[in-house]
Structure formats: C-alpha cells, structure tokens
Image (cartoon, rainbow, N blue to C red):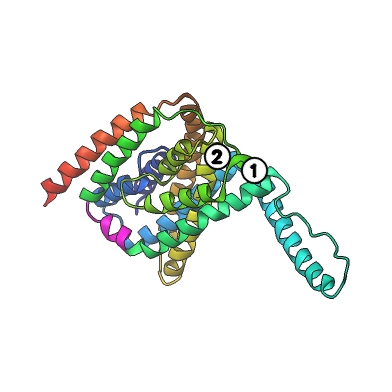
Amino acid sequence: MSLLQAILIGLIYGLTEFLPISSSGHLAFAHMLLETDANTGILFQMLLHVSVLLAVCGVYYKDMFRLLAEGFFILRDVFANIVLFFRNKGKEEHGPYRKLISSGYRKFAVLLLMSAFPSAILGFVASDVVKMASELLLVPGIGLIVMAILLFAANRAKDGEKLPRNLTYTNAFVIGIVQGVAALPGLSGTGVTMIACLFSGFQPNFAAKYAFLMSIPVALLALFREGMQVSELTVEKTSLAYCVVGMLVAAIVGYICIKMMLIVIRKKRFTVFAVYCLLAGAFFIGAHFYMI
C-alpha cells in the first residue's frame, strides 16, 4: 500500500464511518479501485478500527471516563451484595443491599451493554456473510438505497425527550439488534443506530451520543477478531508506517464528522445524505453490472 492509498482510504473511512453513508460500501469500492495488498489490508482494517476509538473518545472522553467509573462501581456493588447475601444467611435481621442502578450514568452504562450484547453476537455470526457480500458492489448498492429511505424517514421523526432514566432495557436490546443487522454492506451502522434511537423517542443529542458510543464495542470486537489474523502476517515497516498515517487521517476526519453530525441530528438535515446514498447506491448497482 502506498502512502497516497493509505491517506485516501483513511479519508474515505473517516468520512463514511461517522456520516450516515456507509463505510463498508465505500471501502469495498475503494479497495477494488486501489487494489490494495491483502496482507496490508487486514492490518489497515484493524488500525481503522483504532481510529474509531480515537475519534469517539476524543469527542466523548468525559462520558467515557464517567461510564468506565460507574461500570467499575457497579461491579464493586455486585460483589458487595454477594458477600452480604452470604452474611445475611441464617440471620433474622438482614443488612441492606446496595442499589446497583443509582444514577443516570449507571443506567446508561447498563443500556450500552444491553445494546452491545445482541450487536456483538449478530456481528460474529454474520461476519463471513458480510465479508462475502462486501466482494460484490450489488449488495452495498442495495444497502445504500435502503439507507437513503431510512434517512428520508428520519427527517420526519418527531423530536423525542428520552434520556437514560426514561429508557427501558428492551429499547436498548432492540437497538443492539438493529445495529447488528446494519453490519451489512451499504448500511451505516452509526447512521442506522442513530435513526433507531430517534424513532425510539431519544432526545436528538442523546441519540447521537448513544450511536457513537455504541460504535466502541463494535470496533473492539472487530479489532480483536482481525488482530488474531494480523499476528500471522508479515508486513514491511514502510507499509506499517503508511497504515498508521492512514489511521491518523481517519481519526482526525472522524472527529470532525462527529461534531458535524451533532449539528445535523439537532436540525434534522438528513436530506443531503439521503440523496447522496440514493445516487451512490444507483452508481454501485450500475458499476456491478458493468463489471460483470
């Protein structure tokens, strides 16, 4: 992979991963055009997942620290309650158990876990199907047209007011399933998750925050899965340096796109992205039949 190829793919990934226009569909097309080396491609894909973590943490670092802290405190209280349970056995007066969900951030952390669980299972089970589908431009093309329809519908969604305290764990579980299905090429995982949150009545800014934070467990799972393959590969130092440059480009562009999406979702300006997805989908489908 050349430096220019790495920068171009990093730029495409940073734009398409956080804007609702499908990174998988655009990357499939970019890799076909640029004809990147298979070994370097696996390594680069892994580093692109790191760029997701960098971009999201760069925007939501305060929330991340708070969520991690509250997650630790939940585990602490679970173990404290287990110890108390055994101490209370055989006693007439029982000591009070600690309340696990005692704040909005604690519930937020549990909601994210509830969403991550079905998303991770679907992503793992369907990984081979997604990989095969990415090799054809037809599937991303159809996915982009479906994405356009969803974006047009999102423009008509009423602004909700739900925050963590108003949400149910069923809401979170369903959104996780939706994100898992959005792994199909042509669909934007972040975009579909955000739209699902809007139709579930989430407050718009919180819908964006939820969708972007949900991309973290997905990126970590993909990073783990592809990291096992990278350990078996040999890549030149120059190619590795180029991949790191591409990762940094993706992270910087992704950070800017997240900030942009916070404005888009607040003002409900999805029409431009919907039209783009419609045109890109038609182009991908046309390119598929042209290349046959």
One can see residue 129 in this view: yes
Mark 1–mark 2 CB contact (< 8 Å): yes
One can see residue 217 in this view: no
SS at circle 2: helix
Outermost residue on the top side: it is: 267
Q: Residues within 10 Å of mark 2 (few under 14, many from 20)?
A: some
| Label located before the other in sequence (1 or 2) | 1
Q: In the rendered image of this protein, does residue 139 appear above or below residue 18?
A: below
Residue 63: image tag: 1
Residue 209: image tag: 2
Q: Of the residues shown, which amino acid type is indicated by label 1? A: Asp
Judging depth in this view, the residue of 264 and 192 nearest the camera is: 192
> In which quadrant of the rendered view does residue 7 lie?
top left
Could you tell me residue 109's position as x and y percent? Answer: 62, 50
SS at circle 1: helix
| Image-based side of 287 in relation to 68, left or right | left
At a point 86% along the width and 63% down the height, the residue shown is: 95
Query: In 3D space, how far apart are the residues under numbered discs 1 and 2 (Cα atoms)?
Result: 9 Å
Q: In the rendered image of this protein, does residue 90 appear above or below residue 109?
A: below
Q: Of the residues shown, which amino acid type is indicated by label 2? A: Lys
Start and end of the magenta stretch? Answer: 129-136
Could you tell me residue 2's position as x and y percent? Answer: 35, 51
What secondary structure do most residues of the magenta stretch adopt?
helix
Could you tell me residue 279's position as x and y percent? Answer: 24, 34
Q: Is residue 126 magenta?
A: no
Q: Residues within 10 Å of mark 1 (few under 14, many from 20)?
A: some
